[in-house]
Image: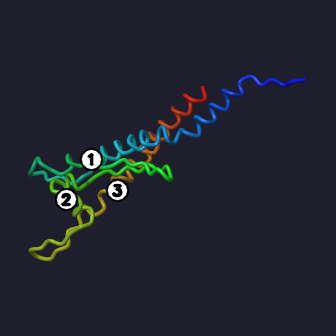
């Protein structure tokens, strides 16, 4: 007597596809989260009201990298060496600075990058999970 399994190959194929889902969507999901974060940073960056040129427009997604050993995907958003000259004042606003003429500590915008990230963290995480969810649904259905 023989036992016959129908659909088992499809099931194994689905399991294999689910195992590789991280490789398939990691960068895509992180990039979507980085876009949301960048948009919020550009909105929250300190701006000079007297001057139309501010570093906020120069902020960018600086890197999206996948580490091959761990499979971790990391996205970096904000100020990079490419835009340093145009946006370095935003760095100093984030950490605070001492006015060289009178020694007064300037801390009006201290922590603006952290505050900006906190504002959009849930929205970015939801967008990333939505992408993962859609890809999983494609495999299962």
Write the residue at 25% across / 54% down: 80
Q: What residue did someone put label 3 on?
A: 115
Mark 1 surroundings within 10 Å by alpha-carbon count, few (fewer than 14), some (14 through 19), many (20 or more): many
Q: With respect to residue 95, does 43 lie above or below?
A: above
Give left or right: position of 64 versus 78: right
Question: Which residue ends up furthest to the bottom in the rendered image?
Answer: 103
Q: Mark 2 points at which residue?
A: 88
User: Which is more toward the observer, 25 or 109?
Assistant: 25
In the picture, measured across the screen, residue 58 lies left or right of residue 6, that is left
Q: Name the residue: 21% across, 52% down.
A: 82
Task: Please state which of residues 23 and 119 is positioned toward the viewer in this rendering.
Answer: 23
Mark earlier in primary sequence (1, 3): 1
- Please name the residue that numbered disc 1 is placed on: 60
Q: Report the number of numbered marks.
A: 3
Give percent across and percent down for residue 99: 14, 71
How many residues crowd mark 3 within 10 Å: few (<14), some (14–19), many (20+)?
Answer: some
Mark 2 neighbour class, 10 Å CA radius: few under 14, some 14 to 19, many 20 or more: some
35 with respect to 132 (left or right): left
The Cα atoms of the two marked residues, 1 and 2, are separated by 13 Å
Which residue is drawn at the image coordinates 41% and 51% (left, top)?
74
- The alpha-carbon separation of the residues under discs 1 and 3 comes to 17 Å
* Residue 57 image offset from top left, x and y in percent: 20, 46
In this view, 85 is above or below 23? below
- Residue at the front extreme, as displayed: 1
Q: What element carries label 2?
A: helix
Q: Do the residues labelled 1 and 3 touch (CB within 8 Å)?
A: no
Q: Position of residue 17 (x, y in %)?
A: 58, 34
Rendering coords of residue 126 (x, y %):
47, 41
Q: Describe the element under mark 1 as helix, strand or loop.
A: strand
Callout 3: helix, strand or loop? helix
């Amino acid at each position: 007597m023989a036992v016959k399994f129908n659909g088992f190959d499809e099931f194994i194929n689905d399991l294999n596809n689910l195992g590789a889902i991280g490789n398939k969507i990691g960068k895509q999901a992180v990039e979507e989260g980085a876009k949301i974060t960048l948009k919020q940073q550009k909105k929250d960056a300190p701006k000079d009201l007297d001057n139309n040129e501010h570093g906020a427009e120069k902020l960018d997604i600086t890197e999206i990298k996948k580490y091959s050993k761990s499979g971790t995907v990391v996205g970096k958003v904000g100020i990079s060496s490419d835009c340093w000259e145009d946006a370095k004042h935003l760095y100093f606003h984030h950490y605070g600075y001492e006015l060289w003429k009178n020694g007064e500590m300037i801390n009006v915008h201290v922590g603006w990058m952290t505050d900006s990230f906190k504002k959009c963290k849930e929205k970015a995480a939801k967008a990333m999970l939505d992408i993962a969810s859609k890809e999983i649904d494609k495999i299962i259905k």
